[in-house]
Image (spheres, coloured by chain):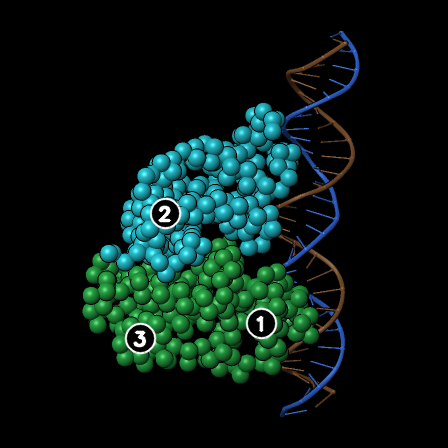
Chain colours: A green, B cyan, C blue, D brown
Amino acid sequence: MSSPISETKVRILQACLKLLVASEGKDVRMSDIAKEAGVSRQALYLHFATRVDLLIATTLYLDEVKGSDDRLVPSRTATSGLERLDAFVEAWANYIPEVYPVGKALLVMKDTDEAAATAWNKRMQDMREGCEAAVLALKKDGQLNTNLNEDKATDILWTLLSIRNWEQLTRDCGWSQAEYAKTLKALARKILLNESP
Amino acid sequence: MSSPISETKVRILQACLKLLVASEGKDVRMSDIAKEAGVSRQALYLHFATRVDLLIATTLYLDEVKGSDDRLVPSRTATSGLERLDAFVEAWANYIPEVYPVGKALLVMKDTDEAAATAWNKRMQDMREGCEAAVLALKKDGQLNTNLNEDKATDILWTLLSIRNWEQLTRDCGWSQAEYAKTLKALARKILLNESP
DNA sequence: CCTTTTACTTGACACGGTGTCAATTGACAT
DNA sequence: ATGTCAATTGACACCGTGTCAAGTAAAAGG
């Protein structure tokens, strides 16, 4: 908890971020990042032990830049369970495209790199907490579909909102971001809520 | 269309299959496969141009072995749209675990290899046709949710049934295969069908 | 029977990308 | 001046894929 974040370290993170965004998370080599940061390739290893470490650090840096925490405020301050669900889905849906490029880089490594998988899972676990909170709020209001217990409802919402689903719907299916957000809100309601009384 | 499939070619495919299944689709090198097949590494390249080519061929070989075509018969012979939807979801749900290990190997490459992406997309496109057929059958019966047009309904069903969702639910969430199949059938109905009249 | 063809082996090598190491430079502090 | 810190330079090891050339062994065919 300290190390006042050396100046070049930040330059490296910025360079990495820039390249990832530009390439949508694909094919960014250490040497590319070094060049972009105006620094030698070896300097990267002075600040980050491995490529995956750098990638992880970049996601954290991005969160910091974007102020990701503030994003969930409306969902946490929502009064009814339904409002909370809507707010959460909306917030997450709009968060995805902002972090996608750098998230994607980690996502790609997840299948082959232990550290990447761990870091990614942690992030997804955090997001899952949002799902759980929304589900619990619904339950409290007696609006949770009676066929679903909290865990299962959370599992489903969590899966529904996965980055890969967003990827498939917006990329492969050509949905606009607005369409995605709107449809997922509707879907979440339809699945989680009780039949209309 | 010919080349009576040399004997060693089959041995290679079997070896590849075996290793992929054993490793759940991870970390299978050309040299491993060669060793398993009792053949030199270079022999692989005599039969398959690249590793991805071999992987693709292995998926086709697996289909052949499993008789994947027969699997969709019940869904195609279903009379009502609802039956068809159920049968399709059921068939696909039970198909996934059988092809997962070898599919996973392709899936991993998809993000970085052009040929792998193309092959994978083709497979998923085939599966999408099943989704579309089910949706159209529902529509014909007047049971398709009136908020959804055919394309959108197909997009949703297709995404819902993705391998990555199966992966997340059965691996990360710990669902059993039976639970997965049952829940996805319910979900598909809930999303695609009209509100109960 | 000898020759060609075919399938496979052997061993060496290039390439790309990550990660390591040792020696060097330059700036700033004391 | 001296030491230290951050960065540079260039070389190198490692791994896995893919390539190449030369050799072997057995079947095919005159």
Disc 3 secondary structure class: helix
Q: Position of residue B161 (x, y in %)?
A: 40, 51
Residue that mark 3 sits on: A83
Residue that label 2 marks: B140
Residue pictured at 41% horizontal, 73% vertical: A91
Task: Answer yes or no: are tags 3 and 1 on the same subunit.
Answer: yes
Judge whether A141 appears above or below A111 on screen. Answer: below
Distance of mark 3 from mark 2, alpha carbons?
36 Å
Decide if residue A184 is on the left or right side of residue A29: left
Q: Tell me if B46 is positioned left or right of A132 in this view.
A: right
Q: Residue at x 25, y 56 (%)?
A: B196
Q: Chain of mark 3?
A: A
Is tag 3's residue or tag 1's residue first in the polypeptide sequence?
1
Secondary structure type for disc 1: helix
Residue lying at 30% horizontally and 70% vertically, measured from the top left: A134
Residue B164 spot, x, y in % from top left: 43, 53
Q: Amino acid at mark 1?
A: Leu
Identify the subunit bearing mark 2: B
Which of the chains bears the disc numbered 1? A
Above/below status of B61 relative to A2: above
Q: Amino acid at mark 2?
A: Lys
Which of the pair B169/A119 is nearer the observer? B169
For marks 1 and 2, give the CA distance.
Answer: 49 Å
Q: Which residue is at 66% across, 74% downward?
A: A37
Total number of numbered discs in the rendering: 3
Dot 2: what SS?
helix
- Looking at this view, is A48 or A61 the one in front? A61
Circle 1/circle 2 CB separation < 8 Å: no
The quarter in which the C terminus of chain A is drawn is: bottom left
Other residues around mark 3 within 10 Å, as few (<14) / some (14–19) / many (≥20): some
Residue type indicated by callout 3? Glu
